[in-house]
Image: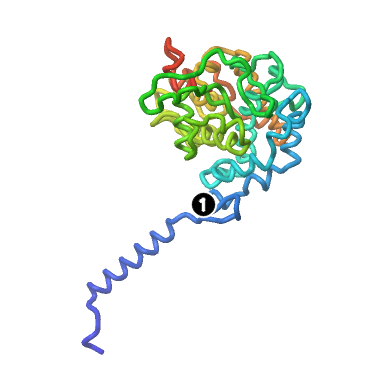
Amino acid sequence: MAGNSLSPEVWMLLLVAAACAHAASSAKPKVCDKGWECKASVYCCNETISDFFQVYQFEDLFSKRNAPIAQAVGFWDYHSFITAAAVYEPLGFGTTGGKQMQMKEVAAFLGHVGSKTSCTNSSTPPNPTVLCFLCSDLPVAGLPLLQVDMALRPREMSPSQSYCDQSYDYPCTPGVDYYGRGALPVYWNYNYGAIGDGLKVDLLNHPEYLEQNATLAFQAAIYRWMTPMKKKQPSAHDVFVGKWKPTKNDTLAKRLPGFGATMNVLYGDLVCGQGSIDAMNNIISHYQYYLDLMGIGRQFSDDNLDCAEQEAFNPSTASSTSSPTAAST
């Protein structure tokens, strides 16, 4: 009916609104579900970690973890790793980029884990002797020795201190020691507190949880990999998968995206900016070794593999307790 006709101006407004709604709908990224392992994320549209990294590969990488020398028999397993990883796959852990990048990130992360928990200190590991939590007197990457107690739980062998530092946000719990525990060993009360907050687990009062539950130990390590330790700084994940763009100051400090920068994020000048030292080369060799074992090949290690000349994101001070980056390793 003529009385119900719309004016040209109204029609124009309706057309504009419809166009805007369509544009907004088109701009919304597609999300996918891959069952229990990855849900409601654009990253879940890629393969999941269990699609390309399966039980036999975990066994190849960590074939010595249940040997008598390891002492941590039965603690670490594939299921614990995948269960922990599933928490972070919707955020891009092992699910960013194409399949090769996904596999490389898993190899990079596990390379760090292997180098920090190895039964050997060789910079060219002859066989997969990782996830042992040090059963000998060989230091790994300059860190305190780790071993497994009679309950087969990873812990520091002879702590030289309780790793308690005065902290307003995370005060030490009386009678609790904050020595290294976990797949990427956590040190100091404030790091246990911050990581515990991120995991929603009371690690400040119960740091021993990381030596009692392999899934939680892996989860804490992946949290460290995915989370910047300071605001306005990248995570190890960011610098590895290319989500981080260096500033001019970063470039001047020779901090560039790649595996080398992951060491900078995680360990700072304990490892980086000191030339070609064993601590750095040990981590790199584990990463390249895992690339070979996973069928990628070390020739795809890419540029910026080391951090020999990189300035630390968070330089250490005279007090070893004042640098969260240094203290967290």
Residue 114 in picture, x, y percent from top left: 66, 27
The residue singled out by tag 1 in the image is 41
Question: Which scheme is used to colour this image of the protein?
Answer: rainbow
Residue 296 or 6: which is nearer the viewer? 296
Q: Quadrant of the N terminus?
A: bottom left
Seen at 71% across and 21% down, the residue is 119
Residue 304 at least partly seen? no
Seen at 31% across and 66% down, the residue is 17
Q: Is residue 62 above or below residue 320?
A: below
The residue positioned farthest toward the front in the image shown: 175
Q: Quadrant of residue 247 in the image? A: top left
Residue 37 at least partly seen? yes
Q: Is residue 303 left or right of residue 231?
A: right
Seen at 62% across and 48% down, the residue is 48
Going by the numbered disc 1, the residue's amino acid type is Ser
Residue 264 or 151: which is nearer the viewer? 151
Residue 165 in picture, x, y percent from top left: 43, 19
Residue 34 in picture, x, y percent from top left: 60, 54
Residue 75 in picture, x, y percent from top left: 69, 34
Residue 43 or 159: which is nearer the viewer? 159
